[in-house]
Image: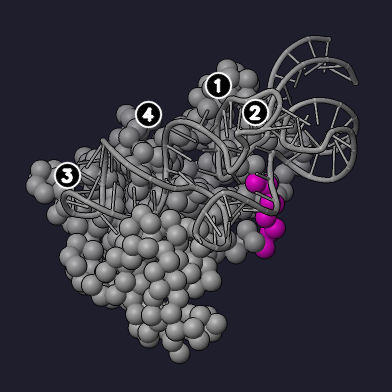
Amino acid sequence: MTAPFPPVEDQLRIIRRGVEKIVPEEELRKLLQHSFDTGTPLRVKYGIDPTGIDVHLGHTVPLRKMRQFQDLGHQAVIIIGNYTALVGDPSGRDEARSKRLTADEVEENARDYLNQVGKVVDLSKAEIHRNGDWFGKMEFADVLALCGRVTVAQLLTREDFAKRYREEKAIYLHECLYPVMQAWDSVEIRSDIELGGTEQLYSFMLARDLQTQQNLRAQVAVMSPILVGLDGVRRMGKSLGNYIGISEPPYEMMKKFMQLPDAVMNMYFELLTELPLDEAKALLAGHPKEAKVTLAKQVITQYYSGEDATAAADRWQAEIGGSALPADIPEQEVPAELREQGTVAAFVLLGKDGLGLCSSNGEARRLISGGGAKLGEDKIPITDPNQQIELQDGLLVWAGRKRYCRIKMQ
RNA sequence: GGGGGAAUACCUAAGCGGCCAAAAGGGCCAGACUGUAAAUCUGGUGGCGUACGCCUUCACAGGUUCGAAUCCUGUUUCCCCCA
């Protein structure tokens, strides 16, 4: 009847991998021990607002951690922040884009989100809650009561608020409420452990306070480091365009992985694969390119199959590492007027009135002058923007290495 | 409620009557090098035209000027300070 949990020390070893901070560290062991002794799974919380949709590798860091907890026999509890999403997320500090989502949109996002999460977490064994279930029922008096539990000084212990306060930048009231709501979720679902990034520390600690006030066992925060994106500097994020989405085709993932700066491979191995760390270390001591291929294959395999991963790697080696032509070259029709002429100036062909490889004729002209334009299987350079190109069906046109197509004469 | 300040191209940011399509950096694109890593170097980075050129752009709408991103008026948005 009791779930057969692995020994506490073994669990700890798995949980600690790729985790930046556990607060408070000692309590985690106690929780695990208690769970082990009583055969009760721990309730592991992870919450997200269903605003954006594309789940990328950065999101999978805590999700993978949740999966590890599941595999150890614990209870996954996913919070969909449908209520907080309705209000509009203020911590999207980049832009003040405040297009308000409708309830339907949020619900659709939530479903879509869960579909993606299901690739990492075993949803059949997870509890899923929407925080609108409780926040939607609150009266204003309840909200005030909740606010009465948190002081401004407490809020200001949060580093980002403190920083903004020091720098005299705006802090809005509803932003202050955000961590409170997030913390209240923990009370509602009685979480034992909460997963998330280190930037969530404040909310996680606040949740402990609130839980204690409600005579509940306080949760332990297990925080992952922020995964850096493909630029190797900033966090992986959709708006930064430096991400690998988990729904991308294997070959797309492969290409992106190979562009990853060497310096961050170590982190990727630790956070995104199960590969024992000493093996990763050995790999990294060898040729970085080989290590990168292994890394890419390991991750791709999680979302597709080993064969898919190998195929993607081989294809990358052939087309990009080697000199083979890309396997799928898009065909592009030439507008009728140009087709009738038979020959076209090179810049027009590449430009927006031709194949559209460049967004303007000026750009095409510059590209050609810079030596980026090539023609045919042998990549014969075009040097003069005004060079007349004879149109023929199937002619391969290159605008740099990454943009290319075949002429389709119909 | 009162006072002060700001809005410039993808971002930061100069410019404060003509020499401004607009400095500089970042980013991005392309080329060399390479392992489509990093570093480095080179060129490019509003549109149209081979080019002297033309057109659109400096929050928005008007105005003053031969001429405005630069001056004036109004509008909008944002920030700060005082109460």
* Prevailing SS of the magenta stretch: loop
In this view, the residue in front, A19 or A31, is A19
Residue named by callout 2:
A171
Residue found 47% across the figure and 58% down from its top: A363
Element assignment for label 4: loop
Residue found 28% across the figure and 61% down from its top: A254
Residue named by callout 3:
A277
Element assignment for label 1: helix
Location of the C terminus of chain A by quadrant is bottom left
Q: CA distance from mark 2 to mark 1?
A: 10 Å
> Mark 2 — on which chain does it sit?
A
Q: As shown in the figure, which amino acid type bears the numbered disc 1?
A: Ala
Quarter of the image where one finds residue A197? top left
Residue named by callout 1:
A162
Q: How is the image coloured?
A: one colour
Q: From the top left corner, tell me how far across and down residue A195 is, in percent.
A: 42, 43
Element assignment for label 2: loop
The mark lying in front, picked from 3 and 4, is: 3
Looking at the image, tell me whether mark 3 or mark 1 is earlier in sequence order.
Answer: 1
Residue A257 visible, this angle: yes
Q: Based on the picture, tell me whether residue A154 belongs to the magenta stretch.
A: no
Q: As shown in the figure, which amino acid type bears the numbered disc 4?
A: Pro
Residue found 50% across the figure and 24% down from its top: A159
Q: CA distance from mark 3 to mark 2?
A: 42 Å
Q: Is label 2 on the same chain as label 1? A: yes
Q: Bin the neighbour count of mark 2 within 10 Å (Cα to Cα): few under 14, some 14-19, many 20 and up.
A: some
Q: From the top left corner, tell me how far across and down residue B8 is, in percent.
A: 63, 38
Quarter of the image where one finds residue B65? top right
Looking at the image, tell me whether mark 2 or mark 4 is earlier in sequence order.
Answer: 4
Q: In the displayed orientation, state which residue is furthest to the bottom.
A: A410
**What segment carries the magenta color?**
A97-104
Q: As shown in the figure, which amino acid type bears the numbered disc 2?
A: Ile
